[in-house]
Every structure is written in structure tokens, then in C-alpha cells.
Amino acid sequence: FFDEGKAVPAENLISAAGSVEVFLGGQQAHGARAYLAPGQIGIYIVAVTLPPDPPTGDAVPVLVRVNGVDSQTVTMAIQ
């Protein structure tokens, strides 16, 4: 793939190994997936599909779970 400690090549998206889940205000988002960010070192892009009726507000709690391990909760605006 690429050398450890080097930026990820832009040619191919490299998916995170294992299970990725994302929760928005306690609701599970669908289709969660994570990729190494092209041109970066150790940064992931996480993409999800919002639930049909997502929580909204200026500070919605967001939690990412990878292989059963929870991230710190952060907040983001969802309108």
C-alpha cells in the first residue's frame, strides 16, 4: 500500500479495517464508513447517511465507534 509514516496516496481510497458506527444525538447513522484521508498522515474521513429524522441543533452530540471502541463525544451543528 504505502510506507508507514508517509502521506496516503491520492490514487486509491483505503478503507478502515473493522466495524465503523456513528451516533448523532444517540441515533445511529446508516452506512458509516471510514477512509484514510488522501495526502494526509493518520487522518480518517468518516462518512454516513443521516437517519430519516436526524436530531438538529447547534451542538448535536456525535460519537464514532470503531471495533466496539468509542471515541470522545464531540458536537456539531445539524440543520
Image (cartoon, rainbow, N blue to C red):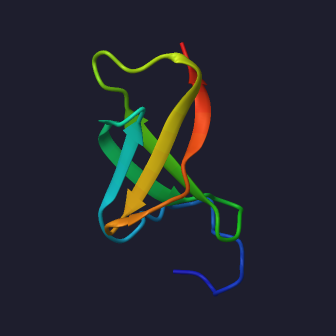
Residue 3's spot in the image, x, y percent? 64, 87
Depicted 1 relative to depicted 16: above or below: below
| Of the pair 23 and 38, the residue shown nearer to us | 23
Side of 49 relative to 47 (left or right):
left
Residue 43's spot in the image, x, y percent? 64, 62
Depicted 7 relative to depicted 54: above or below: below
Residue at point 62%, 59% (across, down): 10
Residue at point 51%, 80% (across, down): 1
Residue at point 31%, 15% (across, down): 53
Figure quadrant of residue 38: bottom right
Quadrant, the C terminus = top right
Figure quadrant of residue 24: top left
Residue 74's spot in the image, x, y percent? 59, 44
Number of numbered discs: 0
Side of 50 relative to 74 (left or right):
left
Figure quadrant of residue 19: bottom left
Side of 22 relative to 73 (left or right):
left
Residue 14's spot in the image, x, y percent? 47, 65
